[in-house]
Image (cartoon, rainbow, N blue to C red):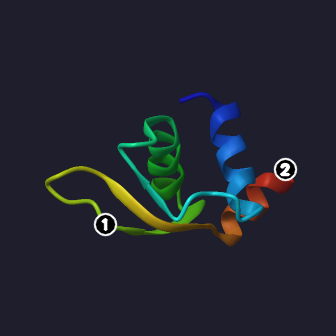
Amino acid sequence: MSLSKLTETLRLAAEGALPRVIDDKTPELLSAIRQLYREGLIHAINASADAGECYLEPEITLAGLQYLKK
């Protein structure tokens, strides 16, 4: 995943412009959210199950906001 895609996704989160449900129907976004979630830059409800990955209501964290200010 490129740094520009991660930063772009983080900016969308800061603007509140991410979809409420991110799953396999949005593979590019899912990959970015997964990485940002693991790094603690995005908070979301991890609703992943045997059927696949799913993140609900993603929001930027304080750490994510600080990252964008760099």
Looking at the image, which is closer to me, 36 or 30? Answer: 30
User: Which badge, 1 or 2, is on the more N-terminal residue?
Assistant: 1
Mark 2: amino acid: Lys
Can you name the residue that lies furthest to the top here? Answer: 2
The image quadrant of residue 50 is bottom left
The image quadrant of residue 13 is bottom right
Q: Residue at (51%, 50%) from the top-left corner?
A: 33
Q: Which mark is residue 70?
A: 2
Q: Are marks 1 and 2 in contact (CB under 8 Å)?
A: no
Q: Is residue 44 above or below residue 23?
A: below
Residue, disc 1: 47
| In the displayed structure image, the side of residue 58 where residue 31 appears, left or right | left
Mark 1: amino acid: Ala
Q: What percent of the width, then of the height, locates residue 25?
A: 39, 43
Q: Is residue 19 above or below residue 29?
A: below
Looking at the image, which is closer to me, 41 or 48? Answer: 48
- Disc 1 versus disc 2: distance between alpha carbons? 31 Å
Q: Residue at (57%, 62%) from the top-left corner?
A: 42
| In the displayed structure image, the side of residue 6 where residue 27 appears, left or right | left
Q: Residue at (74%, 62%) from the top-left corner?
A: 14
Q: What percent of the width, then of the height, locates residue 17?
A: 70, 59
Q: What percent of the width, then of the height, locates residue 58?
A: 54, 65
Q: Which mark is residue 65?
A: none
Element at label 2 = loop
Please rate how many residues cluster around mark 1, counting C-alpha atoms within 10 Å: few if below 14, some from 14 to 19, many from 20: few
Can you name the residue that lies furthest to the right here? Answer: 69
Looking at the image, which is closer to me, 24 or 40? Answer: 24
Can you name the residue that lies furthest to the left here? Answer: 50
| In the displayed structure image, the side of residue 39 where residue 23 appears, left or right | left
Please rate how many residues cluster around mark 2, counting C-alpha atoms within 10 Å: few if below 14, some from 14 to 19, many from 20: few
Element at label 1 = loop
